[in-house]
Amino acid sequence: MNQHSDQSGVGVTRREVLCAATALAAGPVALPAGAQSPAAAFVAAEPPPQLLRLALDVNGVRHDLTADARTTLLDALRERLGLTGTKKGCDHGQCGACTVLVDGRRINSCLTLAVMHDGQPITTIEGFATGPSTGRGPAGLHPLQQAFLKHDGFQCGYCTPGQICSAAGMLAEVKAGMPS
């Protein structure tokens, strides 16, 4: 006689029993009529986002907008104003790709809320150009942008806007006598 034969006559394998038990254990839990699951109660208890009106002065242009109070300056610049030169890198303030200047000081725009800078002058990489490009080289670019091009100061180029903003901020801080 085969040692693995089913001697009980039921015809169900151990694997089928375990699969059925797992499905029953993981299946929906029966709740009393009208009751709400704890997860649904938690989701329903979350308040709606608080929308605030703010004015962002970006590159010398005032932008009036309504935004969620939790919107980062980076997301407001990229998603609401269409200024995509400022990049989202690590989203933790470590890489510097999101660096912009606020009141001439460099900040990581991924770590600050847009509402904190209502009415303050903000400079992004788009605000560094000194005039329209002629299409024949770096005319109209800020001297830092020209230097980056001349000396191949970038690798893939993704974080270059943040590096240029950071360099401009650092030079302004040194000029003002602040330790950098």
Image (cartoon, grey):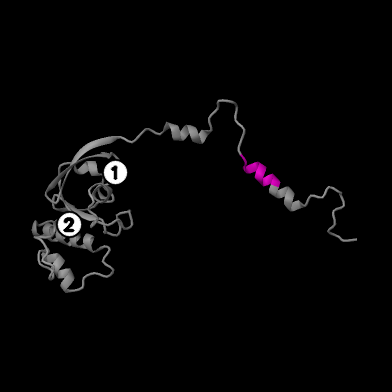
Quadrant in the picture for the C terminus:
bottom left
In the rendered image, the vertical position of residue 118 relative to residue 3, given as above or below = above
Disc 1 target residue: 71
Left or right: residue 59 versus residue 32 is left
Q: Which residues are magenta?
A: 20-27
The percent position of residue 91, horizontal first and vertical second, equals 32, 54
Quadrant in the picture for the N terminus:
bottom right
Q: Kindly state the secondary structure of the residue where label 1 is placed.
A: loop
Question: Is 142 included in the stretch rendered in magenta?
Answer: no
Say few, some or many: other residues with alpha carbon within 10 Å of mark 2 (under 14 / 14 to 19 / 20 or more): some
Residue type beneath disc 1 = Thr
Left or right: residue 133 versus residue 97 is left
Residue at the image position 36 percent from the left and 34 percent from the top: 48
Q: Nearer the viewer, residue 89 or 169?
A: 89
Q: Kindly state the secondary structure of the residue where label 2 is placed.
A: helix
In the rendered image, the vertical position of residue 144 relative to residue 80, given as above or below = below
Disc 2 target residue: 126
Residue type beneath disc 2 = Glu
Question: Is 24 included in the stretch rendered in magenta?
Answer: yes
Give the mark toward the camera: 1 or 2: 2
User: Which quadrant of the structure image shows residue 69?
Assistant: top left
